[in-house]
Amino acid sequence: MNLTLSQYLHQHTNDPSLKELLQQLCHTCTMIAHAVSKGALSGVLGSTTHENVQGEVQKKLDVISNQMLLEGLEWTGTLSGMASEEMDEIYPISSSYQKGPYLLLFDPLDGSSNIDVNVSIGTIFSILKAPHHADHQAITEKDFLQKGREQIAAGYVIYGPQTMLVMTLGKGVVGFTLDRDTATWYLTVPEFKIPSTTKEFAINMSNMRHWEPNMRAYIEDCLAGETGPLKKNYNMRWIAAMVTDVHRILNRGGVFAYPWDAREPGKAGKLRLMYEANPMSFLVEQAGGKSITGKENILDIEPEKIHQRVPVILGSAQEVDCIQEYLNR
Ligand code: AHG
Ligand code: MN
Ligand code: MN
């Protein structure tokens, strides 16, 4: 019989706070999965009239899942604060609850544009140590600005044909499948290993004219196929939910890129360092892949702002190296 999530955590961490945090986080995600699967029947589809701090119109489910995560975790005594892609400010744990040794960062609903069209979406999370927890100091944004390498755990829950949890505690990447009848997570993938080579890329090609010339050159050479400089026939996939593209890459390899582009030159990229790039890069490195901006490894970036954006290129190690060579030209 497959291990349950509780059994797995019991075997792989001896920190009761971390165990409790991960259990409650995954429990909250089973409730998000339920809301997602009800769709129109529970009135969760469609948009709100609000824009988030990123200037994106929030979907109802962005707001609902954000609230579910706050309420599902603030009382647990495991956290000093939370930060979310959907909230302007950090969320310190209120004085009505006990504070704990961790910080939780999340993208409550990744792939928002997929919600209303019934395509896979997910929740991404990253767990850091709360630096001043022992001193009882008030938590500030600065406490969250830790490099990706400092993450204690990270992962995502994907709401697709199956609901799966993919997670790392810094010793490899494992996957659990939710048994929806009993609301139990079972270990179904004991180890994800990303093949080092690939013939598959994921990029939003409609932005091609805005990319740097060297990024364009790489994709043009992919499109040239077997007789071109890369000597391979490539396949392309783009799901518009990083969770789902990364899930495919963890399973069968590939590269995913959301590079810098000139549409908004002031912004370093589209994806958010703290809620998307760091947790996904931790998973990808732990599964033997690589994750870069084109200038540095994502996990080595010193964050400057909580909502900072970065270019992201990740996946099969040899292909990421190949893209880096193009970008160095
Ligand atoms: P979110 O729904 O959390 O805003 O994230 C969407 C992100 C990412 O998941 C996806 O890869 C990318 O944005 C899609 O962007 P385009 O719509 O520009 O293709
Ligand atoms: Mn996202
Ligand atoms: Mn989101």
Image (spheres, grey):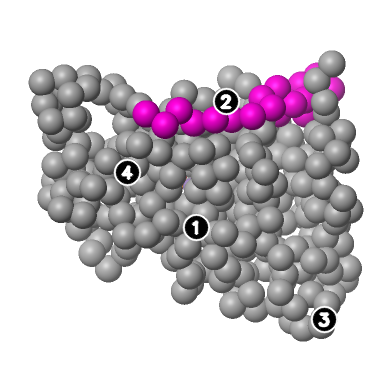
Mark 4, residues whose alpha carbon is within 10 Å: few (<14), some, or many (≥20)? Answer: some
Between discs 4 and 3, the one toward the N terminus: 3
Q: Secondary structure at mark 4?
A: helix
How far apart are the two marked residues, 4 and 3, measured between alpha carbons? 44 Å
Q: Which residue is mark 4?
A: 321
- Read off the magenta span: 176-197
Q: Which residue is mark 1?
A: 299
Tell me the residue at 79%/75% (across/down). 133
Queried on whether the Cβ of the residue with tag 2 lies below 8 angstroms from ligand 1, the answer reads: no
- List the single residue furthest toward the top: 1
Residue type beneath disc 3: His
Where residue 160 is drawn, which disc sits there? 2
41 vs 277: above or below: above
* In this rendering, the label closer to the viewer, 1 or 2: 1
Between discs 2 and 3, the one toward the N terminus: 3
Residue type beneath disc 4: Asp
Residue type beneath disc 2: Gly
Contact between labelled residues 3 and 2, with CB atoms less than 8 Å apart: no
| The one of 306 and 55 positioned closer to us in this rendering | 306
Contact between labelled residues 2 and 4, with CB atoms less than 8 Å apart: no
Q: Which residue is mark 3?
A: 136
Q: Secondary structure at mark 3?
A: loop
* In this rendering, the label closer to the viewer, 4 or 2: 4
Mark 3, residues whose alpha carbon is within 10 Å: few (<14), some, or many (≥20)? Answer: few
